[in-house]
Each structure stands twice: as C-alpha cells, then as structure tokens.
Amino acid sequence: MRDNQVMTLEVEPQTRRDARHLPTITLGFIPLTDCAVLAVARERGFAVREGIDLRLSREVSWANIRDKVALGHLQGAQMLAGMPIATTLGINQIPMPMQVPFCLNRNGNAITVSNTLHDAMAQGDGLPAWDDVAAAGRALQRVIAQRQAEGRAPLTFGMVYPFSCHNYELRYWMAASGIDPDNDVRLVVVPPPLMVDSLRDGHIDGFCVGEPWSSVAVEANLGRIIVSKAKLWRHGMEKVVGVPKVWASQNGAVLAALIRALDRAAAWADDPANCHELATLLAAPEYLGMPEGVVARALCGEILTGSGLEHRAVDDFLVLHRNGANLPSIEHALWIYSQMVRWRQAVRRPGDEAVIRAIFRPDVYRAALAGAPWEPDPMAAGPGIEASDELDLFDHRPFDPTNIDAYLA
Amino acid sequence: MGDPTLTILIIEENPVRAAILEDGMREAGYGRIIHVSDMVTVPDKICAIDPDVIVIGLENASRDTLEQMFQVSRTVRRPIAMFVDTSDTATIQAAVDAGVSTYVVDGLKKERVRPIIDVTISRFHAFRRLQEELAEAKEALAARKVIERAKGILMKQKNINEDEAYNLLRRAAMSQKRKLFEIAQSVLTTAQLFDEA
C-alpha cells in the first residue's frame, strides 16, 4: 500500500459511486471519434466503478497535449502512438520518459482526396477499386508523374502531426508506390478541424486524418475516401494513453484502476449493439460537437466513401477492443520508430529499441487486468496477441523488430 | 524602441486579441506586423512572410502546424511568443523552466507586448545556444569514447602503452590529414571486421 488512494479503492460499492471521494485523474483528449473509450469510461460509469474520478480535458492541439502532460496539468492523455516515443527520446523537445499502458484503438484513419484529384486518378487505367491501397498508390503516382511532365506545382497532402501515424502511413504508402514524399508532394500539418476547409479552399489536395473528418469531407461533397488504415496497416496501433513514467510509478494502484475502467469501456464501445448510443454520446458538444449521423459511420463500420454513393461495410475500420486491440504493441511501436529514422526525424541510436520497449507496457496492462472479475479478451490475456500483432502493411514487406537496420537498409 | 526591422507574425482568430497585440507592437516601435486570422492559410503565410518572431495563443490549433514547420527545416526555427488569457504563474514558470523557446504571459495588455517580444527573442537565442553547446559536448564525449576504445585495441594488438597508442593515432591523423576521431573510428571498424571474420 503506497498511498491513501489505494484505500479508496477498497471502500463499499455504494460509496464508490460517489465520485467526490475518489482519486481524480485528468486526461486530455482531442475531439476525434477515437477518443470514444475515454468518453465511455467517464460517461457510462466505468471509471467510478473502478474507484476513480476520471475527468477529461478537451484540447485543441497535440502540442498542447504534450506540453500540458509535461507540465503536470494533465496526468496523461490520448496521444498519437508516435508521441510518447518522440517525447521519451527528446526529438525536438525536452526529453521526458513516458509510459503507454493502454492502446485506445487500432485503425480508424482514412486517406481522402479532393474530387478533382479523384477524377484525375480515375483516368488512365480506370478507377482504383475502393480500398485497393496498391492500386490507389499507382493511380496517384501516375497523376504526379503527369503533373511533373506538365511542369505543374506538386500536390499537397495534409496530415495531423509530425509524429502521427497519419504522417507515417501517407509516407509509407507513397514511397511504396514510387512517390518520394519529400520531393514529389508537399506534406503539411493541418489540425483536423481545419482539414475540410483546407480541402475546400484548395490549400491541400488530400489528407490522412482520423474520423469523423473524412466523413465530413464526403458529407460536404468535397472529396472521396480512397483508402482506410485498416487496409493500409492492418490492426495498426493508432491512439494510446500516454502518462509520464514518473507518474505511473508513483500511482500504480490508480493507474491499474484506470486501465481496468478503460478496458471495460472499450469492450462496451466496441460492441456493435452500442454503436448508435455511442455516436449520440460522442456527437455531444462537450466531445465532438458534430452531427450524430457522421460520427456513427466509423463507429458502426458503415463508411460512405463519396457523396451519393452507397454505404460500405468496412471490416475493422475502427477497432476499439476486440482482437487484443487495447494491448500496447511493442512491435508496432518499433515500426513507428523505424519510420522516424527513415524520414530523418530521429537519429538511429543502438540503445533506442530498449528505450521503446520500456515505454510500451503490455505487462502493465495485463497485470492490471489479472485480478479483474471479468473474462479478459482472449487475445489480450494470453501470449496469442504477439502473433496477431505482427506488423502487416499493405505491401506485406516483412518487418523484423530485432533488426531495424536491415529493414531500413 | 522595438526593432523596426523585425517582421512579427500574429496568428490569432479573435480580432480583439489580435488588435491588442498589434497596437502594442506598433506603439513599441516594431515595424512590420502581419496578422493572420484565417488558420487555413497559416502554412502558406509563414513561408511567404518568413517572420522573425511568431506570436500565437496557447489554445490555438495551428501550434501543431508550427511544430512541423520547425522540424522540417531548422532554418525556419523562429522565436515564438505564446500567451494565455488566464493568470496562471505556475504555467508560466513551468514553461520557462522547461526551456521551450516560448514565453507565456498572463493576460493581454498592449503595454506588456514589448517586453514579451524582447524576452522571447533573448530566451530563444539563449536556448538555441544551450542546445548547440549540448550537442557539441555530446559529440565531443562520443568522439572521446571512440578514441579511448581505439587506443585500447592498439595497446592490445601491438602490445604498447597508452601514450604510444595515442601517438600512433595522432601521427596517422596528421599524415592522412584526417581528424583523430575518424582514424579511431576506422580502427574500430577494422577490428570489428577481423572479429567477425
């Protein structure tokens, strides 16, 4: 028993529901569909049931999230999976060791292009089939080659943050399709709420972003969704809960309670029977403040890829719990690190793998659930998840996490 | 008087706050002040204007855009003044302690704009100098380690003492007109090759 907060966890169930006496945790979030698990943990009582008063602070930028966590204004936050790596390694910032005990979701992003670019891509060999990642890449490469031959300005794509999976997904997809993401296109950071306006005003020709922003662009008939992250990087780690390592080590019991609450919230949120109720919750002004119908698309896996088209059922478009989704993946984290090196954000240092293994903590997640009275997700409980978490990108190029140098050679 | 040759870019959606900042800067004698209120055009504006100082609110979503622009090219790294509306001295102190090249002020009064810009610029330069010194120190340390290891290898291989090993490295560096560190590095590489063979 390290602190009196542990005592609070052992009080009678009736008093537990009174959040006033519970230890408080404040987590930051960005208004995106994949903040769902955090919202559910708070609003559906899962946090209080585990003996914590979970408060959520809506933030406008990832830079703000990073700074407020670093300054201790927030105990932790929803983070892009690359952020805790960048913060721990001190890339363009003061280094601060972070810990990731929980993954909020796998997949959930999409690549959307303007109607004009979509039409250009549809010429020649014809329209790439929806979500055929390789064919879409070839079509884009063709358009870019033609534009270069005509001496036109390079296409511009928006993504959300330098250390975002969106950045690495766009770059990987382009590079594998024969496009140099540093020279053949311009990549710019655009905050998600500005993405659709930027597309409308012609500042960008396409973007990779989390929902609901691709659906908002489709709703406004400004673009087409051409690729889902589910296909580009199967079961790819996306948002995580990141906390300072110091805080995690000093608040072990509270962190374990938070992990249990998030796990239960994730199971509820991932249940297809709850997707419309969840959409209503997230559509509220304190979360996304967006139309419920648009928010529901990713949650219910029914994506509208273009205005006037049919809804498409997209398998695993957004995965909140099943198949061990909440387990932080060391292998995926190491792949993200390899991309930081590949695109010269990070300088390759031999000790970095060990540093990253110490950030992403499936063991902390499992230990928190070990005493839980419910049946854990079978993938998350056993060693099986390691197999299912093997990195699988659309071109199926094998990734050996023990030999990053060979992968990058 | 503020430096009239400086170009200052204000990124602010709220016209009232932008006006306070702009007035304060003009009165302080700063010459070129440009205000962007349309966040969609921020990246283009920064490239076109190439400002010396950027002033932005802490709660502005375009901060993420700035982060990327500074990462892509170190040459566009610029001092940023950030402001918050609430009076929170803890935030200010912590931000300054954290060494970010920013200065957070409580509240917006046009009389306070000048010192903020001054402090931002001087802090930025101080921080950048520290960073450069740190990088140099790290490099020197890494080089010394390599030289130490190369000396160790030579001592063992040639059965000589430390001074002799050092002199050997130094002579090789002088005759080949290369840095001592580079010679030491090639000794290590060669030794590695022999170990693996």
Image (cartoon, rainbow, N blue to C red):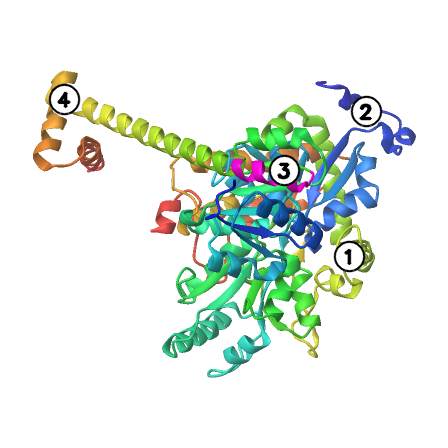
Q: Are marks 1 and 2 in contact (CB under 8 Å)?
A: no
Q: Residues within 10 Å of mark 2 (few under 14, many from 20)?
A: some
User: Mark 3, mark 4: which one is toward the viewer?
Assistant: 3
Magenta-highlighted stretch: main secondary structure?
A: helix
Taking the spot 41% from the left edge, 47% from the top edge, the residue there is B74
Disc 3 from disc 2: Cα separation = 47 Å
User: Dividing the image into 4 quarters, which one contains the N terminus of chain A?
Assistant: top right
What kind of residue is marked 3? Answer: Arg
What kind of residue is marked 4? Answer: Ala
Disc 3 from disc 4: Cα separation = 61 Å
Q: Which residue is mark 2?
A: A8
Disc 1 from disc 2: Cα separation = 34 Å
Disc 1 from disc 4: Cα separation = 70 Å
Q: Which residue is mark 3?
A: B112
Same chain, labels 3 and 4 = yes
Residue A16, quarter of the rendered image = top right
The boundaries of the magenta stretch are: B107-118
Q: Is residue A378 above or below residue A122?
A: above
User: Mark 1, mark 4: which one is toward the viewer?
Assistant: 1
Give the x, y percent position of residue B73. Answer: 42, 50
Residue A126 in sight: yes
Q: Residues within 10 Å of mark 3 (few under 14, many from 20)?
A: some
User: Mark 4, mark 2: which one is toward the viewer?
Assistant: 4
Q: Which residue is mark 1?
A: A289
Disc 4 from disc 2: Cα separation = 65 Å
In the rendered structure, find residue B165 and report the number of the disc placed on it. 4
